[in-house]
Image (tube, helix red, strand yellow):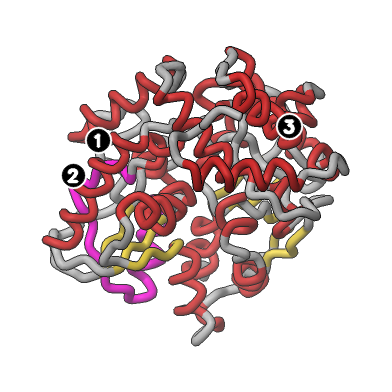
Amino acid sequence: MLFLLNNTMQDNWILSRIERCNDCDACLEVCPTYIATKNPLFSPKGRLKSVKNLMESGEITEEMVTAFYNCPKCAACEVVCPQDIEVSKIVALIRNKIVENGKGPLPVHKKIIQGILEKGNSVNGDPSERLRWLPEPFEPQRSWTLFFVGCLPSYLVKDAAVYSYLVLKKLGVDFMILEDEGCCGTYIYEAGEVQIAERFFRENADRFKKLGITRLIVACNGCLKCFKYFYREVLGSVDFEVFHVLQVIYEELKKYPSLLRKVERKATYHDSCRLGRGERYTEEPRELLKWCGVQVHELPRSREEALCCGSGGGIRSAFKDLSFDIASNLLKQTEIEELISPCPFCTFNLNYTNKIGHMGKKIIYITKVIWESLTEG
């Protein structure tokens, strides 16, 4: 048996997880990449077998690189796995190994990482236009709470930035924003570039500490996972807490739900992988929507078992067609015209798929619905 990660403890940990798999195939029923491709290699079970082959042969094949980079790390498999195998963690460790061996990240990942390092965002946006989304002049101010908007909301899914900002202001939440906010760095970590991610994370953490920031509010689920988990994993500890904007809004509005006017509408609520499955934050968004007068419809799979939209983990940039197929599968199961999402990346990918596929849906970031209810009448 060859050493895989040059770390005996990690090797033993991975091997123990692989040996737990009893070939029950439960993961095949929920894995978005397997459902879309029917390729056993692109399934949790197939990925585990690839790792075992790697540990025995030491060879990283091209197919294996594809299999580990086309995993959205949605963790749907982990919910149904009777052996509690942490597939997402194994995928992350193998991506690191692929990078160490010079076979990753993929070219498109390298390009995006370079853009993050040069421009401070993952979408090739002009840094001078970072705050173009602002609906009103915002005077610079100091606060221990930072509304960290994120790359996608700042440039491509501006509704997530605009309406999150407006709702927070309306509810009297004290916060600051940064003109030169930069990126959380999740894309760097997800691509397996842990050494670059460590430097990047440290710079952000040091900056927050210098500014006296002890709480982050984020509109992006990727930012949430990165700041809450990846930073601590890589740096050991950080001096701030992080909350999704919905968590903050819910805590404010549950004191005075009567602030929300009933805006009668029917909509499907989609639990994003990071917030729904990752944080188990499922009932509060539905309660918020009901306070707004929304008749909430459910997908066949919801909450911790919700369908992945196919955009996370770096998959959409490198495997756009696969991401499209996964998103199409989700939208085909949505009977109601409106679909409400708490994730900018889900919103972006589902909107793109809806437009290209002529699927007749309307995908809305959730704080827009809350804002409309707050200002109705």
Depth order, front residue of 46/188? 46
Residue 146 seen by the camera: yes
Residue at 74% in and 62% down:
296
Q: Disc number at residue 365?
A: none
Question: Magenta stretch containing residue 298, yes or no?
Answer: no
Disc 3 residue crowd, few under 14, some 14–19, many 20+, Cα 10 Å: many
Contact (Cβ within 8 Å) of mark 2 with mark 1: yes
Q: Identify which amino acid the numbered label 2 is placed on.
A: Asp
Q: Mark 1 points at which residue?
A: 120
Find numbered disc 2 in the image and state the secondary structure of the residue it sits on.
loop
Residue lying furthest bottom? 255
Instruction: Read off the residue under disc 2.
Output: 180
Question: How far is mark 2 from mark 3, CA to CA?
Answer: 40 Å
In the picture, residue 136 is in which quadrant?
Answer: bottom left
Q: Which of marks 2 and 1 is nearer the N terminus?
A: 1
Q: Name the residue under label 3.
A: 43
Give the x, y percent position of residue 188: 37, 35
Amino acid on which the number 1 mark rests in the picture: Gly
Q: Where is residue 236 in the image (x, y as percent from the top left)?
A: 33, 58
Q: Give the range drawn in magenta.
A: 161-184
Residue count near mark 2 (Cα–Cα under 10 Å), binned few <14, some 14–19, many ≥20: few
Mark 2 → mark 1, Cα distance in angstroms:
8 Å
Q: Can residue 355 be seen in this view?
A: no
Among the 4 quarters of the image, the one containing residue 362:
top right
Front residue of 256/322: it is: 322
